[in-house]
Image (spheres, grey):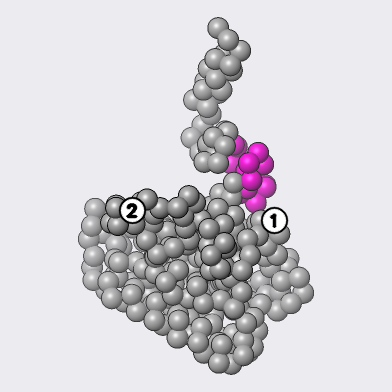
């Protein structure tokens, strides 16, 4: 038996012997990573620099100066206006998301300081129903932009949504696209600053609304950014897409974003 085969068997047995949830395989380099090690490194692979999904509370802690954060608009909870039922009812999905994440909703909003500068900071968390924008997410972000317009404090929003508009709420969800864009317009008319940070993934109604309207648009490396995913576009158009289509690097090359930043350098 070659050393390579022996090593593969040992690693395979090691993975099987680990309790569930302790380790994962990195999509960038396929190496096995311990979740604690990953969390200690801001959820960035130490081997290939792949930027894994980072929980919203971790981003808030990473960006705001210690002890400066004050949560805004807490206690807003989504209803079930359509009494929507799919493979599970919307109420059950919301309850499970709250239990799994410890969050009330997919959006977090805070006031605090970033390197000593006052900011209003928003964040969408893809762990909560893919970070999709329902009525509460839209309401929280709208209030954040309007508070920025009122106070002239810069607004920073870190977006991570693979779910776009939350169709469980039907037109109530789609209306949030118009509402958040209108609030950003108010911020701009007041002379305020909006910095939009796009992470993997930022898709659908999030990207088609407020996330693309920043005065400055930053993105994490290799983040998937767009309206519809490349697989759907390819199937629909029957066209071959360019390499790395809809990745942050592709968007930077075509002038859609201003800069790509490593997570450790975001602050």
Give residue 237's position: percent from left, percent from top. 30, 57
Residue 91, relative to residue 78: is it above or below?
above
Q: Which residue is located at x 22 percent, y 60 percent?
A: 85
- Judged left or right of residue 61, residue 204 is left
The picture quadrant where one finds residue 120 is bottom right
List the residue tagged with mark 1: 264
Q: Is residue 159 visible?
A: yes
Instruction: Give x and y (percent) for residue 215.
Output: 59, 78
Specify the quadrant that holds the N terminus: top right
248 over 192 or under it: above or below: above
Q: Is residue 45 magenta?
A: yes
Viewer can see residue 22: no
Which contiguous range is marked in magenta?
A: 33-49
Position of residue 115 in the picture relative to residue 235 (left or right): right
List the single residue furthest toward the right.
116
The residue drawn where x is 67% and y is 41% is: 46
User: Would you name the residue on which mark 2 appears?
Assistant: 239
Helix, strand or loop under label 1: helix
Which mark identifies residue 115? none
Q: Earlier in the sequence, mark 2 or mark 1?
A: 2
Q: Residues within 10 Å of mark 1 (few under 14, many from 20)?
A: few
Residue 135 rendering spot, x and y as whole percentages = 38, 75
Circles 2 and 1 in contact, beta carbons < 8 Å? no
Residue at 49% over, 51% down = 244
Q: Which residue sits at x=56%, y=49%? A: 52
């Amino acid at each position: 038996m070659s050393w390579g085969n022996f090593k593969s068997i040992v690693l395979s047995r090691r993975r099987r012997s680990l309790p569930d949830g302790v380790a994962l395989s990195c999509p960038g380099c396929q190496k096995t990573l311990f979740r604690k090690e990953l969390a200690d490194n801001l959820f960035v692979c130490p081997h290939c620099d792949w930027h894994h999904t980072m929980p919203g509370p971790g981003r808030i802690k990473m960006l705001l100066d210690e002890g400066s954060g004050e949560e805004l608009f807490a206690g807003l909870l989504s209803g079930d206006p359509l009494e929507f039922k799919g493979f599970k009812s919307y109420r059950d999905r919301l309850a499970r998301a709250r239990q799994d994440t410890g969050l009330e909703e997919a959006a977090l909003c805070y006031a605090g300081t970033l390197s000593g500068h006052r900011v209003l900071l928003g964040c969408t968390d893809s762990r909560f129903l893919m970070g999709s924008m329902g009525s509460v997410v839209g309401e929280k972000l709208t209030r954040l932009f309007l508070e920025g317009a009122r106070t002239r404090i810069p607004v920073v929003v870190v977006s991570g949504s693979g779910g776009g508009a939350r169709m469980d709420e039907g037109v109530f969800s789609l209306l949030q696209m118009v509402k958040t864009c209108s609030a950003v317009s108010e911020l701009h008319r007041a002379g305020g600053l909006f910095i939009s940070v796009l992470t993997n993934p930022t898709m659908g109604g999030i990207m088609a609304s407020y996330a693309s309207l920043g005065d400055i648009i930053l993105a994490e490396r290799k983040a998937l950014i767009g309206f519809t995913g490349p697989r759907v576009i390819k199937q629909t158009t029957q066209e071959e897409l360019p390499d790395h289509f809809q990745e942050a690097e592709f968007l930077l090359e075509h002038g859609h974003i201003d800069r790509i930043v490593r997570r450790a350098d975001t602050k």
